[in-house]
Amino acid sequence: MAVYRGIAEKMVEVYDFDWENNIRMKEVCICSVEGIISNITNIILVFLTTAALRISQEALIFIATFAAMRFYAGGAHAKNYVRCVSTYLGVLLISIGCARFGATLQDNFINMICGLSLLIAAVFNYKYAARQVHLGERTIGYRKRAGRIFAVVCTIMILFCIFCSYIEIDIVRKGVREVVLIQAFALLAQSIALWIGRSECGEGR
């Protein structure tokens, strides 16, 4: 976005450095600052939106699951900042809405949704996670970390699904169901992002 770019340029130029003889370094710094500004703005927008809708706790569960996998596994990128945050917010809100509805279903349906989500996520992450060409030598390390995070999420979901039927308090059982389903939809979103960005992956990596 031009506004972010302009702010980043002004912030970099304030720093006392010989930028005229270091044009490439200046461009790198501008891009880095622009990225930081964009990330901060996106976080604020997501926080304000979810707070206004009173779904901050659900949003944190989705973000923790999605972002943890996405950081190491990689995935598709939007063409601009506006499309990025709008798409992310849309996916987050739809996922939470589906999770709230799904929490009213029988345990068998919830277990089926979670199982399907884990299966799709396992296949897509095995095939595409951290295989992006730009990772270079970091590929192996990133794939191991993505695998560990997936194993943790998978374990939590399975344990919650097993013990959910033993919870007698309705409000607690519904809350646990929502948590599991939000994680399931977050994994699905992350898997789809991986599949969309598969063109960035190198062969045989």
Image (cartoon, rainbow, N blue to C red):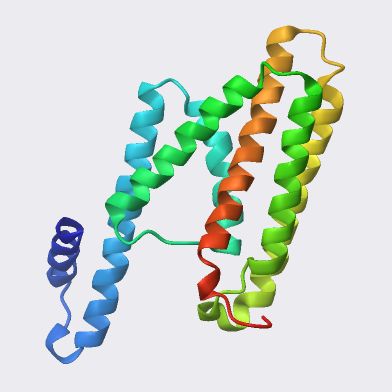
**Residue 68 sits above or below residue 10 on the image:** above
- Residue 98: percent from the left, percent from the top? 56, 28
Nearest the camera: 175 or 99? 99
The percent coordinates of residue 22 (x first, y second) are 21, 88
Residue for point 29% across, 59% down: 80
Q: Nearer the viewer, residue 200 or 48?
A: 200
Name above or below for residue 19 compared with residue 117: below
Looking at the image, residue 121 lies above or below residue 100? below
* Left or right position of 28 against 197: left
Query: How far from the left and from the top, in percent, is residue 113?
Result: 72, 35
Q: Residue at x 69, y 76 (%)?
A: 140
Check the picture and name the quadrant holding the C terminus. bottom right
Quick check: 44 left or right of 181? left
In this rendered view, identify the residue nearer to me: 38 or 89: 89
Where is the N terminus found, in terms of image quarters?
bottom left
The reply, left or right, for residue 15 in relation to residue 170 is left
Please name the residue shown 54% across and 80% down the image. Answer: 133
Q: Is residue 153 visible?
A: no
- In the rendered view, would you say 142 is above or below 91? below
**Residue 63, how many percent across, how many down?**
53, 42
Residue 98 seen in this snapshot = yes
Residue lying furthest bottom in this view? 21
Instruction: Identify the residue at image location x=71%, y=23%.
Output: 176
Quarter residue 164 falls in: top right
Direction from residue 76 to residue 102 in the image, left or right:
right
Give the number of marks. 0
Residue sitting nearer the eye, 205 or 113: 113
